Amino acid sequence: MIYLDYQATTPLAPEAFAAMEPWLKDGFANPHSAHAAGRAAAAAVEVARDEIAALLPTGGRVIFTSGATEAINLAIMGCGLPVTAAATEHAAVLDVVEFLGGRTFPVDIAGLIRPETHDDLASGSFGGPALIAIMLVNNEIGTIQPIAELAGAAHAKGNLFLCDAVQAFGRMPIPDGPDMIAISAHKIHGPKGIGALWVRDGVALTPQMMGGGQEQGMRSGTLSPALCAGFGAAAKLAAERMDADAIHVSALWDRAASAFGDWTINGSVTERYKGNLNIRRDGVDAARLISECRNIAFSAGSACASGSGRPSHVLRALGLTDAQAKSSIRLGFGRYTTAEEIDMAAAAINRSAEAML
């Protein structure tokens, strides 16, 4: 199997597995217990917290959650403000926005927030104070938003700013500016089932889970030292390998973009994380293509929306038609992808696509 679905999840790094293993075997104590074994588990949690915080801005705290979806829910529901978000946000944001009666604002054909929207953020035409949610790297098309600039515009009118940095964390420096940042372990070669919300000092949130208040009073429930340790190890490894990973991914992008020369790239080509290649070709049925190329793992968009049959809301927000959206595929690659895998996958996908035309 050639795995090209890095936006959905990433392979677990051996270093993350090794960090988790002792806490899955002998280190099973509850990290909230006062005895020696519990204190040892709690210490492992705090080491992991520091390793994760090292990749985030200073002047804030890391709150562990079950994943980025919970982190986003805590941020939006917990701040108690009206919320508005980009139309290309992840469902974890958009569904909460809809539930709260918030609204969305448009992007351009490249997936970037339009200049007039920048002005709106600064002028307060959304009716502040409010929470503005914009992701750093889009999970479907890889477009990178100017988060520092956008956060500054939001702050100019007294608004708070939430950044979904799931696809960026560990892959590039996270810009200062946001008041809250949501991240996830399994997108940086860590384990599934754990994420975090970074909260700037001075930002007050209301807990959304009642109980023992174990995680800094903001989240109830017993933390898993194993998951925390795996997340921390993955973050530490990402910090050490960030430059090397970026060079590797850029080379894979060049190779893949060349191999799919007959396809059109969706999203920005310049303002983009290059581990994401979202492309379309008229006349291609993406769902059928995925079925036929069963030895290659790739997608037609977000894993969260797979099987719905609906065209991608992200691609539709770019101005693509339903037909264009349904003829688009997303290839995601990263640290453990080889050039040979890109070549073999491109040949197989192109061969199947040609047969449809």
Image (cartoon, rainbow, N blue to C red):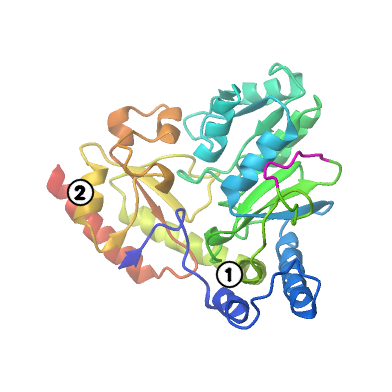
209 within the magenta span: yes
Of callouts 1 and 2, which one flags the residue occurring earlier in the amino acid sequence? 1
Residue type at mark 2 is: Ala
The numbered dot on residue 336 is none
* 229 vs 218, nearest the viewer: 218
**Picture residue at 69% right of the left edge, 70% below the top:** 30
- Would you place residue 182 above or below residue 322 in this image? below
Label of residue 353 in the image: 2
Q: Main secondary structure of the magenta part?
A: loop
277 left or right, relative to 343: right
Magenta region, residue range: 203-210
Q: Residue at 76% across / 38% down in the picture? A: 206
Determine whether 132 is above or below 224 in the image: above
Of 24 and 29, the residue lying toward us: 29
Q: Quadrant of the N terminus?
A: bottom left
Cα–Cα gap, marks 1 and 2:
33 Å
Q: Pinpoint residue 311: horizontal percent, then vertical percent.
A: 34, 34
Query: In the picture provided, is 92 more to the left or to the right than 62?
Result: left
Is residue 336 in view?
yes
Residue at the disc numbered 1: 244
